[in-house]
Image: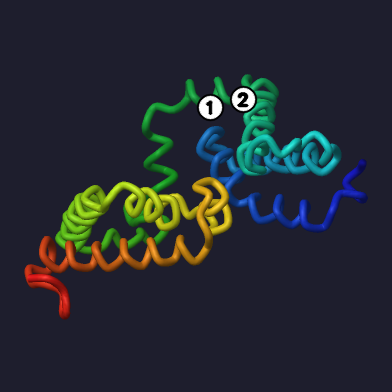
Amino acid sequence: MTAQTASADYCSQIEVLRPVLLKYARLQLRNPAWAEDAVSETVLAALEKPQAFAGNSQLKTWLIGILKHKLVDQIRRNSREMSTTASSDDGEDLDDLLFAADGHWREMQHDWGNPEDALRQLDFMKVLEACVEKLPGQQGRLFMMREWLELESDEICKELAITPTNLWVILHRARLRLRECLQLGWFGAPAAGGAT
């Protein structure tokens, strides 16, 4: 099977995952052009041999496995250039990259936001995590699978052998318990209509 005969669904799934692959490659190679080359080679390999994907893992996992080999190939091909770049990095080049001759930033810096808001959000996440840990076993597990791991409902139902209706009832109850816990632990007041 060639790239031309691969199913449209398979091709579209790969295209959706391309940004994830590119982000991973950029983090590994620190060179956008090399990262793009490695991702293109990965996508091409996946499209040329779609039958190689046996479905034993998620498509994303399989593609990252291919990408890892392509990254190693990129590093080998460009190792000479990488070593000369690394040896000439004495800190002065960084200043030239970041600052113009007049001492101002070359690019507008991102707004880092309000540190107090960031700390407040971090504190909120700690309270939320504590509330999730207090959920009864199955409620907590289902909530984590659906909301934090972002698994699809049908995947959860299949794995836990429950019906979609049962899943939604359990999730609804979990959300009600979380709401009450957050009202007490974060907002400092009992939820309206909840237990006091």
Can residue 101 be seen here? The reply is no
Q: Residues within 10 Å of mark 2 (few under 14, many from 20)?
A: few
Q: Residues within 10 Å of mark 1 (few under 14, many from 20)?
A: few
- Residue drawn 38% across and 62% down? 171
Give residue 121's position: percent from left, percent from top: 22, 59
Specify the quadrant of the image occupied by residue 58: top right
Q: Determine whether 6 is above or below 177 in the image.
A: above
**Colouring used for the render:** rainbow
Position of residue 181 in the picture relative to residue 40 (left or right): left
Position of residue 149 in the picture relative to residue 83 (left or right): left
- C-alpha span from label 2 to label 1: 6 Å
Q: Name the residue that disc number 2 marks.
A: 81
Q: Say which quadrant the N terminus sits in.
A: top right
Rendered image: mark on residue 196:
none
Disc 1 element: helix
Going by the numbered disc 2, the residue's amino acid type is Glu
Give residue 21's position: percent from left, percent from top: 61, 44
Rendered image: mark on residue 85:
1
Say if mark 2 contacts mark 1, CB within 8 Å. yes
Can residue 186 be seen here? The reply is yes
Give residue 59's position: percent from left, percent from top: 67, 43
Viewer-side residue, 28 vs 192: 192
- Residue drawn 62% across and 25% down? 81
Viewer-side residue, 169 vs 125: 169
Specify the quadrant of the image occupied by residue 41: top right
Give residue 107's position: percent from left, percent from top: 42, 58
- Residue drawn 82% across and 44% down? 47
Q: Determine whether 194 is above or below 15 in the image.
A: below
Position of residue 44 in the picture relative to residue 73 (left or right): right
Disc 2 element: helix
